[in-house]
Image (cartoon, helix red, strand yellow):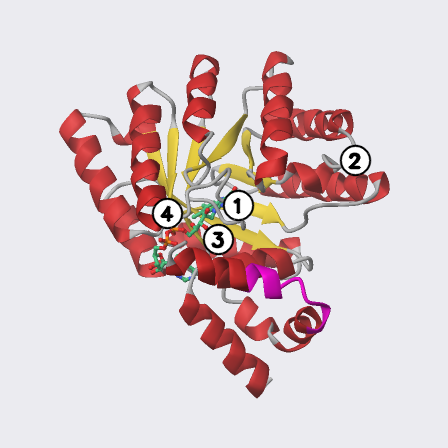
Amino acid sequence: MDFNQSYRSFVLAIAQNKGIKNLVLTRGRNFARRFIAGDTLEEALRVVEALERDRIHAILDLLGEMVTSEAEARKFQGEIVRLVQAFGALPYPRYVALKLTQLGLDLSEDLAFALMQEILAEAHKVDCFVRIDMEDSPRVEATLRVYKRLREAGFDNTGLVLQSYLKRTEQDLQDLIPLRTPVRIVKGAYKEPPEVAFQDKRMVDAQFMVLCKKALENGLYTAIASHDPQIIQEMKRWTAEKGIGRERFEFQLLYGVRRDEQKKLAAEGYTVRAYVPYGTDWYPYFSRRIAERPENLLFVARSLIQG
Ligand code: FDA
């Protein structure tokens, strides 16, 4: 296992500790605001306006995952519908992201499917795209099944995320080609064992490129979701060399990460979207951001000490 993997495993493991969680929730809030638009939908919509001034479009994500009751899943669904409607009133491209465990995937696939259908119907009315984020490996199979059922039911305003650290992903991509699935390629943010995931960062990076190129060569609309300068550079070079038009792909980055690069890409004429999370359930998302970069852990430690 290389340093990056060990570091990520370490952070994601200590993030489970209740004492650490309470400390971060009470004292790490200010630092967390670097990655999170705010607690409310209204705050998130203000961030959308600000990004649009730099020609960056937003992907709004109401934070929440792994619900343990149907009531909770329905509550999230209601809030996501409210999000879609409010976004629909703005004169910008509409795009939201969600997680199926936020809609009760762990309780029942039928429940997540039913709640998704209502969200997609509402989103269709305001021309809103709904990205299904990909969660940890035990949920990949169920996520793919729900997505395929939604497509069979006639919804085409949705797409999936594929993680380059998973050994299974190349085959998953192959299976999604006939459905013309809009894909977002990411490296993957969870703690995964060597049986299912590459542990060597170089392998994960190389695989990222393989997947993006394969998706584009097969005509899938592809979101290249990475902050990695080498990946961004190579994908710009390769798409230009292959004559792949800029209308066939876009770059996606996280709100609060490499803001200058986001502006630069947009100024160069690429479609750029920033993933903008909001809501009070920010701890799991925040832990994954810390796990991606050792420097972030130092910032958190400092804000915990300073309060
Ligand atoms: P890498 O981690 O190699 O970072 C490259 C460089 O980017 C770093 O050197 C640093 O400069 C900068 N950087 C990266 N992360 C940073 C951070 N947290 N803070 C500050 N700087 C940082 N994952 C998943 O499993 N399921 C999903 O659905 C999604 N969805 C998603 C959407 C979007 C729009 C993005 C950009 C990412 C995701 N991810 C995700 C997360 C993804 O899997 C991955 O963990 C992060 O993007 C970090 O990987 P990079 O590709 O940026 O490269």
Q: Nearer the viewer, mark 1 or mark 2?
A: 1
Residue nearer the viewer, 284 or 136: 136
**Amino acid at pointer 4:** Ser
Mark found first going from the N terminus, 2 or 3: 3
Query: In what quadrant of the picture does the N terminus appear?
Result: bottom left
Q: Residue 127 appears at what percent x and percent y?
A: 54, 28
Disc 1 packing (10 Å; few <14; some 14–19; many ≥20): few
**Contact check, label 4 and label 1, Cβ < 8 Å:** no
Q: Is the residue 61 above or below the residue 182 in the image?
A: below
Q: Nearer the viewer, mark 4 or mark 1?
A: 1
Mark found first going from the N terminus, 4 or 2: 2
Q: Residue 234 appears at what percent x and percent y?
A: 21, 41
**Amino acid at pointer 1:** Pro
Mark found first going from the N terminus, 1 or 3: 3
Range shown magenta: 11-19
The residue labelled by disc 3 is: 49
C-alpha span from label 1 to label 3: 40 Å
Q: Which labelled disc corresponds to residue 193? A: 1
Residue drawn at 67 percent across, 29 percent down: 122
The residue labelled by disc 2 is: 107
Residue drawn at 50 percent across, 49 percent down: 189
Q: SS class of the residue under badge 3?
A: helix
Q: Which labelled disc corresponds to residue 41? A: none
Q: Is residue 17 left or right of residue 73?
A: left
- Magenta stretch: includes residue 166: no
Disc 3 packing (10 Å; few <14; some 14–19; many ≥20): some
Considering the whole magenta stretch, tell me its main secondary structure: helix
**Amino acid at pointer 3:** Glu
Mark 2 C-beta closer than 8 Å to ligand 1: no
Mark found first going from the N terminus, 1 or 2: 2
**Contact check, label 2 and label 3, Cβ < 8 Å:** no
The residue labelled by disc 4 is: 226
